Image: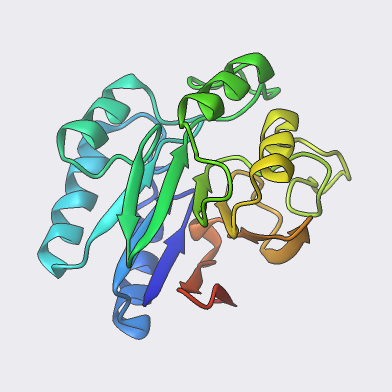
Amino acid sequence: MDILCVADLHGEVQAKQFLFEFIKSTKPDAIILAGDVTCGSVSYAEDLFDGLEKTGIPFYAVHGNNDPEPVQDFFEETGHDLAGKRTVIGGIPFYGLGGSGPTPFNTVCEYTEETIGKKLAELKVPDNEEFILVSHAPPRDCESDRTSRGNHVGSRSLREFVLAKKPAVVICGHVHEQHLTEKLGGTIIAKVGTLMHRKALVLSIPEDKVTLL
């Protein structure tokens, strides 16, 4: 099963065009939107979801730090919200974490590390479960969370969760500069660059193969 993963559309019309180009070229079995779908516009999300519904391909989303409560509510109301939930895709449990830690930009959905840790605990992931996590933000102190200035801006609580719970894969976005895969412990970090820059990746399950696009 091939899952097209994108992040950081930021309400851009061109990003939406790129998404449908990727759908046409990859013909995925499912689609994951890993946050910052909008910069506040519910109408953008409505138009995007309407287009995705017409493809007939299942799709799932977590909110990013730029997706306000009305957008989060829309994700929930339409049944595509993955944040705070366990959803089985292709026979594999997926869990979702939205938002990010604090940023210099004072965006609308930033959490303290304590809150992120609480949200991860509330997922109630069983010990030794084989699962995949979709998080808008990457874990701390990886290549995935390194900005162009060399600063690490990921979540410490998420890093601790990954090392403790050992998900097979973490799909994440947030840091626009990075588009790569790496390992944290035994976990594959599938860091997708911003769709605004025509970046995406395909996760093939159950083999957990990541193809950067």
The number of numbered discs placed on residues in the rendered structure image is: 0
Q: Is residue 129 left or right of residue 153?
A: left
Q: Is residue 88 left or right of residue 144?
A: left
User: Which is more toward the observer, 104 or 59?
Assistant: 59
Q: In the rendering, at what x and y percent does residue 166 appear?
A: 66, 50
Q: Would you place residue 14 above or below residue 151 in this image?
A: below
User: Which is more toward the observer, 109 or 16?
Assistant: 109
**Residue 35 seen anywhere in this rendered image of the structure:** no
Q: Is residue 15 left or right of residue 165?
A: left
User: Which is more toward the observer, 43 or 140?
Assistant: 140
Q: Residue at x 35, y 84 (%)?
A: 25
Q: In the rendering, at what x and y percent does residue 172 appear?
A: 57, 50
Quadrant of the frame with the N terminus: bottom left
Q: Is residue 163 left or right of residue 114?
A: right
Q: Would you place residue 186 above or below residue 75 in this image?
A: below
**Residue 186 seen anywhere in this rendered image of the structure:** yes
Q: How is the image coloured?
A: rainbow
Q: In the rendering, at what x and y percent does residue 47 appear?
A: 18, 48
Q: In the rendering, at what x and y percent does residue 107 appear?
A: 54, 22
Q: Would you place residue 151 above or below residue 110 in this image?
A: below
Q: Residue at x 37, y 82 (%)?
A: 26
Q: Residue at x 74, y 60 (%)?
A: 186
Q: Residue furthest right?
A: 150
User: Which is more toward the observer, 213 or 97?
Assistant: 97
Q: Residue at x 16, y 69 (%)?
A: 55
Quadrant of the frame with the C terminus: bottom right
